[in-house]
Image (spheres, rainbow, N blue to C red):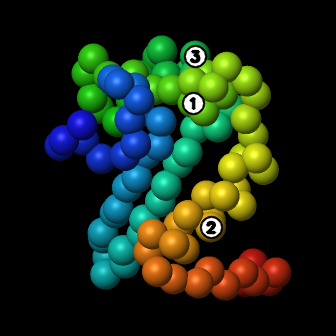
Amino acid sequence: PPPYTGVWMGDSKLCAIGVHCGNHITSHGLALNCCTDLTWFDHIVPCGLEGKGVTSLSHELGRHVTVSHVLEPFLDSFQEVFGCSLVFSEDPG
């Protein structure tokens, strides 16, 4: 819901999206909660948003969903939405 970023299921955040700029470097990230232990969020105010929760695909679907289950369809959708082609490298350096 505006003005909050990310993907929401009601009042619970499913996917966080962030951008950080500093020292002439811009970095960005995305966190999709697949099978996250949600009890950790009981000890903090997630994303600094009082009264909002956090959820996961496993919780919402009522079954265990791992990153390997969603990675390929997520990347396919990413390429389609942003009109790009992803290039993968085996070399992490």
Q: Which residue is mark 1?
A: 56
Is disc 1 surrounded by few (<14), some (14 to 19) or many (20+) residues within 10 Å? many
Tag 3: residue type? Thr
Q: Is residue 67 above or below residue 79?
A: above
Position of the N terminus by quadrant: top left
Label 2, label 1: how far apart the Cα atoms are: 20 Å
Residue at 82% from the left image edge and 81% from the top image edge: 90
| Residue 51 position within the rendered picture, expressed as x and y whole percent measured from the top left | 27, 17
Numbered label attached to residue 78: none
Tag 1: residue type? Ser
Residue at 73% from the left image edge and 24% from the top image edge: 63
Is disc 2 surrounded by few (<14), some (14 to 19) or many (20+) residues within 10 Å? few
Label 3, label 2: how far apart the Cα atoms are: 31 Å
Please say whether residue 56 is visible from this viewpoint: yes
Q: Is residue 70 above or below residue 4?
A: below
Q: Is residue 13 above or below residue 24?
A: above
Which quarter of the picture shows residue 39?
Answer: top right
Q: Which residue is mark 2?
A: 76
Numbered label attached to residue 39: 3
42 relative position to 90: left or right: left
